Image: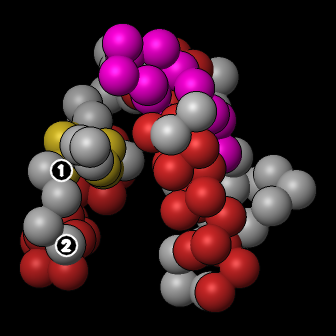
Amino acid sequence: MQFVIVNKYDAVDTQDKLYERCSIPIFQDLSVPAEANVWSLHEGKKDDMYVYDREGNLAAYLPKAGPESINLSTEDGYAFVRGSILSVLNP
């Protein structure tokens, strides 16, 4: 399993705080959103999560504003994200 974070283009100033808090690789979106805006490539938004299967296919899309919480700081959000990932790993 591999995890990556894409830091929002206008959050460069807070990137060091993100590096201090996690050991997941962090990619920086470009400074001009029209050039990259990586979330829009999947018609998503900041803080949405994407889970890909072993073949690199999008297996689960977990929108921040979806019906289920994806807030990893809460028990329900953590359980939902964990279950979503496990369901892709063990179909």
**Residue type beneath disc 1:** Ile
Cβ atoms at labels 2 and 1 below 8 Å apart? yes
Residue under label 2: 22
Magenta region includes residue 59: yes
Is disc 1 surrounded by few (<14), some (14 to 19) or many (20+) residues within 10 Å?
Answer: some
Q: Which stretch did the figure color magenta? A: 50-62
Residue 37 visible in the current orientation = no
Q: Secondary structure at mark 2?
A: loop
Judge from the rendering whether residue 27 lies leftward or rightward of residue 57; answer left or right.
left
Q: In the rendered view, would you say 8 is above or below 41?
A: below
Instruction: Place residue 68 in its image quadrant.
Output: bottom right
Quadrant location of the C terminus? Answer: top right
Residue that appears at 71% across and 79% down: 76
| Image coordinates for residue 87, horizontal then vertical, percent | 59, 44
| Image coordinates for residue 58, horizontal then vertical, percent | 53, 21
| Image coordinates for residue 55, horizontal then vertical, percent | 36, 12
Quadrant location of the N terminus? Answer: top left
- Taking depth in this image into account, of 7 and 76 the one nearest to the observer is 76
Number of numbered labels in the structure image:
2
**Residue type beneath disc 2:** Cys
Residue that appears at 23% across and 43% down: 2
Which numbered marker is on residue 12? Answer: none
Q: In the rendered view, would you say 78 is above or below 39?
A: below
Which numbered marker is on residue 26? Answer: 1
